[in-house]
């Protein structure tokens, strides 16, 4: 019997999708625990932990309870945590001076975490918004405009306090011009040449940050004001490349794109152009949307989380900051074929 073969396709991409072992062999990208960075919130409180209503499953931790919580992340193989403080309102001022208190919440947290988990990577956020009475990331003038160079001077003090406490990576997230160079110069001049800088080089003025601002307690201080005079316009991508180029030239070791999923194109462009370590931030609003939809029964949380995080890797991210880190790592251990 002769079969007419000309009407059948010789190239059948589905052959490589039929069996799990083949899918594993030809998979272009993968996701693992060591791709994830876990953001944590620390607070001065008598309570062990405080729920964050807009971020189900995420809590503010006292330093003692944070130690126990981070132990879980370490056991799961997560390589680093990013520390974000929730500052007592009585300590917030117009100039945010609590940010460079050497006995403040973040330095004490760094010291404790480094003592308990010497092999864990510690990343500290450098910005003034958790510390300012107005909720902005810098010092403001009488019109409410952020004063760039005065703010940079304060950020340098904050970075040095964190470096002295033993942090591994300084992560300036403020979007002030020239702050990476100023911080790098100060670190070098004070004997912290090995302290790394992860710059939030392309941080957009995004609506996806709302749950985070609730978590750190800056939303009420900020009120109806916005951050559009220093965070990037969501319409721009060429500008992101310029920002990244400037920060690399000023001494950034790694760069961040924030938010993540709506800006995967920026991650791809940055990775292709600069070939430096690039991180994406799977921000609070992205987390909250998946959680809310999963709780309503509209989607499969595990499948959507792992697909979303894999998308960061496919776009070119070397690592992802994500509030899903603990759950994602557990799910990866279970397998996902």
Image (cartoon, rainbow, N blue to C red):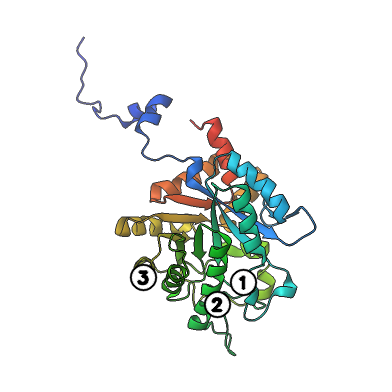
In the rendered view, tell whether residue 89 sits above or below residue 149: above
**Distance from label 1 to label 2 (Cα)?**
8 Å
Q: Position of residue 210 (x, y in %)?
A: 62, 64
Q: Is residue 19 visible?
A: no
Residue 25 location in percent, x, y? Answer: 36, 29
The image position of residue 62, as x and y in percent, is 72, 56
Q: Which mark is residue 99?
A: 1
- Residue bearing mark 2: 154
Determine whether the residue tagged by mark 3 lies in a helix, strand or loop. helix
Q: Residues within 10 Å of mark 1 (few under 14, many from 20)?
A: many
In the image shown, does 269 or 150 lie closer to the viewer?
150
Quadrant that contains the N terminus:
top left
Q: Earlier in the sequence, mark 1 or mark 2?
A: 1
In the image, what residue occupies the spot 64% across and 44% down? 71
Q: Report the disc number at residue 62.
A: none
Q: Would residue 4 be visible to someone looking at this image? A: yes
- Looking at the image, is mark 3 or mark 2 nearer the viewer? 2
Q: Are marks 1 and 3 in contact (CB under 8 Å)?
A: no
Q: Residue furthest right?
A: 46
Q: Earlier in the sequence, mark 1 or mark 3?
A: 1
Relative to 104, is 76 above or below?
Answer: above
The label nearer to you, 1 versus 3, is 1
Mark 1 and mark 3: span between their CA atoms? Answer: 25 Å
Looking at the image, residue 318 sits to the left or right of residue 77; the answer is left
Residue 246 circle label: 3
Query: In the structure shown, which secondary structural element does the residue marked by tag 2 occupy?
Result: helix
Separation (CA) of disc 3 from disc 2: 20 Å
The front one of 152 and 205 is 152
């Amino acid at each position: 019997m002769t079969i007419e073969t000309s009407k059948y396709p010789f190239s059948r991409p589905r052959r490589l999708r039929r069996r799990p072992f083949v899918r594993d062999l030809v998979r272009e990208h993968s996701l693992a625990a060591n791709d994830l960075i876990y953001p944590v919130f620390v607070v001065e409180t008598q309570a062990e932990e405080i729920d964050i209503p807009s971020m189900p499953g995420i809590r503010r931790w006292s330093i003692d309870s944070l130690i126990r919580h981070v132990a879980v992340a370490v056991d799961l193989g997560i390589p680093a945590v990013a520390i974000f403080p929730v500052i007592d309102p009585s300590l917030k001022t117009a100039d945010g001076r609590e940010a460079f208190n050497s006995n403040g919440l973040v330095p004490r947290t760094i010291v404790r975490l480094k003592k308990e988990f010497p092999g864990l990577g510690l990343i500290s956020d450098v910005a003034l918004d958790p510390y300012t009475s107005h909720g902005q990331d810098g010092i403001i003038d009488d019109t409410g405009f952020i004063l760039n160079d005065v703010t940079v001077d304060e950020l340098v003090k904050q970075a040095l306090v964190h470096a002295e406490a033993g942090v591994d990576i300084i992560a300036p997230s403020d979007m002030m011009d020239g702050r990476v160079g100023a911080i790098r110069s100060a670190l070098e001049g004070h004997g912290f040449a090995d302290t790394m800088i992860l710059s939030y080089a392309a941080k957009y003025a995004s609506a996806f940050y709302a749950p985070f601002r609730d978590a750190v307690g800056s939303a009420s201080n900020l009120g109806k004001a916005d951050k559009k005079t220093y965070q990037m316009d969501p319409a721009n991508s060429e500008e992101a490349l310029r920002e990244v180029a400037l920060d690399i030239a000023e001494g950034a070791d790694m760069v961040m794109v924030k938010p993540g999923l709506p800006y995967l194109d920026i991650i791809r462009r940055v990775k292709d152009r600069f070939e430096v370590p690039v991180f994406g931030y799977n921000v609070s609003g992205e987390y909250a949307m998946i959680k809310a939809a999963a709780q309503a029964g509209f989607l499969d949380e595990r499948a959507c989380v792992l697909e979303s995080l894999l998308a960061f890797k496919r776009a070119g991210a070397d690592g992802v900051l994500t509030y899903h880190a603990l759950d994602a790592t557990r799910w990866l251990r279970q397998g996902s074929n």
